[in-house]
Image (cartoon, coloured by chain):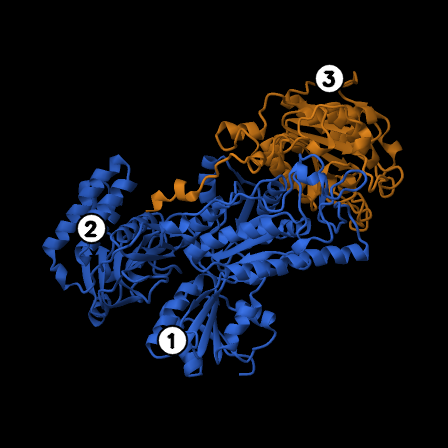
Chain colours: A blue, B orange
Amino acid sequence: MTDDELIWRISGGSGDGIASTSQNFAKALMRSGLNVFTHRHYPSRIRGGHTYTEIRASSDPVNSRGDGYNFLLALGDSFARNPQEEAVYGNEEIKPLSENLDELREGGVIVYDEGLLDASEIPDFEERAEENDWHVYPLDLRGLARDQGREVMRNTAGVGATCALTGMDLDHVQDLMRDAMPEKILEPNLEILQIAYDQVREEYDVDASDVSVPTGEHDETQLLMSGSDAISYGAIDEGCRFIAGYPMTPWTEVFTIMTKNLPKLGGISEQVEDEIAAAALAVGASHAGVKAMSGSSGGGFALMSEPLGLAEMTETPVVLVEAMRAGPSTGMPTKPEQSDLEHVLYTSQGDSQRVVLAPGTVEEAYEQSRIAFRLAYEYQIPSILLYDQKLGGEMTNVSKSHFDREPNPTLGKTLSEDALADEPHSPDGKFHRFQHDVEDGVSPRSIPGQKGGRFLATGNEHDPTGHIAESPDNRVAQIDRRTQKLEAIRDDLDTVDTGSYAGPDDAQYGILTFGSQQGTVEEAVGRLNDAGVSVKSYGVSDMLPFPTEQVEAFVESVDEVLVVEMTASGQFRGLVQKNLGRYGEKLSSLLKYNGNPFEPAEIVDGFEAAIIEGDGDASGHQTTFVPAAGD
Amino acid sequence: MSTFSAIGEEREIDRDEYTPGVEPQPTWCPGCGDFSVLKALKQALPEVGRTPEETLLCTGIGCSGKLNSYLDTYGFHTIHGRSLPVARAAKLANPDLEVIAAGGDGDGYGIGGNHFIHTARENHDMTYIVFNNEIFGLTKGQTSPTSPKGHKSKTQPSGSAKEPIKPLSMSLNAGASYVARTAAVNPNQAKEILIEAIEHDGFAHVDFLTQCPTWNKDARQYVPYIDVNESDDYDFDKTDRVEAAEMMRETEESLYEGEVLTGRFYVDEDRPSYGSEKQAIGEMPEEPLAERYWDDDYEWERSHDMFLDKHA
């Protein structure tokens, strides 16, 4: 155990304030000058059930969860179901302690609420603690909180104990509590924090603990932000003022953030009857001249297939976000996976004419949310932002200056009434909204209510005025024009370069990944190079149109490539091969689909087993190796 | 020149303005009731003073969806059952537009039934015309949600075992503030009802009986029709929810016994439209949102200035 990072895990029951306590503590660590990264694990349940949040804090940049963790604060689960040994869910009351032992590192610290948790119910607890050199602190956090105010404030007592045992000053925590808590509960909480802190320092030799909080310093103002926050702010800064949606985990986060903020901006949020309506409303609002979005997760997005196709055919700009969770069907609602990739690329009838971007980090989520809007409106095409429960919910610190940019409310190639007058019209005055020969395939549009702009938008194939037309010549001209937009978008994206690269340029091996696994892959690449393995990585964000040239150059430059993704069938590897048309013998897969994101060590071990040793068996991990074609 | 100068324009409107040059002759079958909807709309729109370019007509799929091709306004021919969500968002984005939605009985009461219920519930300020011909016409004569029990078709060869939908009752229960039924065979009443529906501030639902001579009934089967507001045989208060419900029930049942009752069944002028409700709770701007994108003086807000400090 070293001092260079604290990975603090707070566990308890769903509904016990684990999320808010951890968010405040993460912010306190950030304010103390550290870089932080959080990882959430929670059940699909309103109250009760094992949940934890992990905060990794270091003076070095952190862009991934760590390998295991080194400090456990185990609180009780107020809503645990009655413990019955024969119940399939086991004894829920003890889970905040028992479920978290396997991943606790050697030399780690355990603080548990002995007012609610009885360690003697866990088989071999003492032996395991001794074997692993765990420092165990049973504290009556509940009793302490009850004496001062309310039992629920035991979370605060646990934070006080954490500070005492890690040598962290209370200042930042106190400041945060002052910012976050209403007057009524602030005073008792501050008292509980201090008492717990003092009590631990009096009763225990706190220096005996090997885990201490590192120190660090930031050059500029930092913000603690999730991917869902970043996506929402990107949308707002692109002038999005309309959202329609239906609740579904984990997409609800973006929907909630937008709904809270849009009225402050004179915008509109609509909660509607289903996701078909949600996407159709976004299309309708955009058609009437407002920048609009909708979104959902897997099952809800399935319902959006039809309006998505309508937006493609009518060339109505719209942004949809898709927050992936483990499927198929209802799957595992609160667990991350990346297996909606093919669903999002290909759903809806006909040839896909859409943009799909998959950001890898919180900063990229902001950036690519803006790019998705820009492309949608400039090229009159639906853009989809594909992310997952992991990126949406994890929080990390980002520099405030990253967001200090001009807003972009422009509607793209939309004509004023003056400009409309100079455009081609039919003899009866109908505007040629869908002209055949136009630059980049983008035919300028008008907005209902404009004089000289009337046209028909239709999901049928249509002529330049929008009228239904099935002549072969018109059909070919229209579909070629719409497809041409994708080529122009590819050129446009090449000037932005949304990819993320790590490791030496001349590395012998490569790792390809997409979306939220990027940070973890990059940490693994750093460790592999430190260990003398020459490897580099490329986190790809553009799923459609695909950056074929860049990916081909990457694959071409190395001997072998391991494709890392959270799917069971290797969808991203399939996409790479489909676009490259070859290299099947060079690409193997490392997959994880057990409901938890990769840890860096799983990629390090998986890479060594697959590529260096060549047998693919990374023992001890729940990852799956799929060899290259022909192997 | 303002951004949307077609909106609110005061001028004489000729009904020929609504006839497109591209496709002036509809492809509906001879004797089709759909012609009457087109004609009634062409008469109603000039009377209410809405020009083709301040009107947005959103349609579904089916013979009725082709209305867009023959009525020259801004149009959005959407997908099967989805005209209402597209239409109501356009109305929220720009409340100054005259928004009309239209579709068939399969489109509105079947596949789009969920949207129908919720749009009525929310009372959006728009007109919804349902071409009710009691059949799926364009796909060649299958049983529809309003086909009578026992209706035989290639998809219900033994005769449908289902009771038909009761569209007027459904509309009233869902929350529509104007509910009427008219018939293609009654052009004067159709025009008057469409004028009232368009002028009504709220969700106005018009169940429009449009005979399908090819697959179902011809016009004669809708004659004689009775206007329940004018007939001495019926006495009910259309502003009274309970009386309206009873009248609707009788109307819906008698249709399948060969008696065609039409008229205004429910009118609630007091219920605020959804837009006003949303403005009242501060969740919709007073000025049309669509105007803002053309306002050079508008200072667009940034997340950097408004929302980031709470993350620090």
Determine the CA span between mark 3 and mark 2: 76 Å
User: Judging from the image, what secondary structure is the residue with disc 1 in?
Assistant: helix
Which is more N-terminal, label 1 or label 2? 2
Q: Residue at x 52, y 32 (%)?
A: B284
The residue beneath circle 3 is B235
Q: Is residue A305 left or right of residue A90?
A: right
The chain identifier of the residue carrying mark 1 reads: A
The residue beneath circle 1 is A605
User: Dividing the image into 4 quarters, which one contains the N terminus of chain A?
Assistant: bottom left
Residue sitting farthest toward the left: A202
> In the rendered structure, which amino acid carries the disc numbered 2?
Gly
Compared with residue A55, is residue A286 higher up or lower down, i.e. above or below? above
Residue B155 drawn at (x, y percent): 78, 51
Q: Residue at x 42, y 50 (%)?
A: A45
Residue A600 drawn at (x, y percent): 37, 68
Q: Is label 3 or label 2 in front? A: 2
Q: Is residue A235 left or right of residue A491?
A: left
The chain identifier of the residue carrying mark 2 reads: A
The chain identifier of the residue carrying mark 3 reads: B
**Are the residues under badges 3 and 2 in a single subunit?**
no
Determine the CA span between mark 2 and mark 1: 37 Å
> In the rendered structure, which amino acid carries the disc numbered 1?
Asp
> In the rendered structure, which amino acid carries the disc numbered 3?
Asp
Occupied quadrant, residue A117: bottom left
User: Judging from the image, what secondary structure is the residue with disc 2 in?
Assistant: helix
Residue A160: numbered disc: 2
Determine the CA span between mark 3 and mark 1: 83 Å
Mark 3 nearby-residue class (10 Å; few <14, some 14–19, many ≥20): few
Is B98 or B6 nearer to us in this picture? Answer: B6
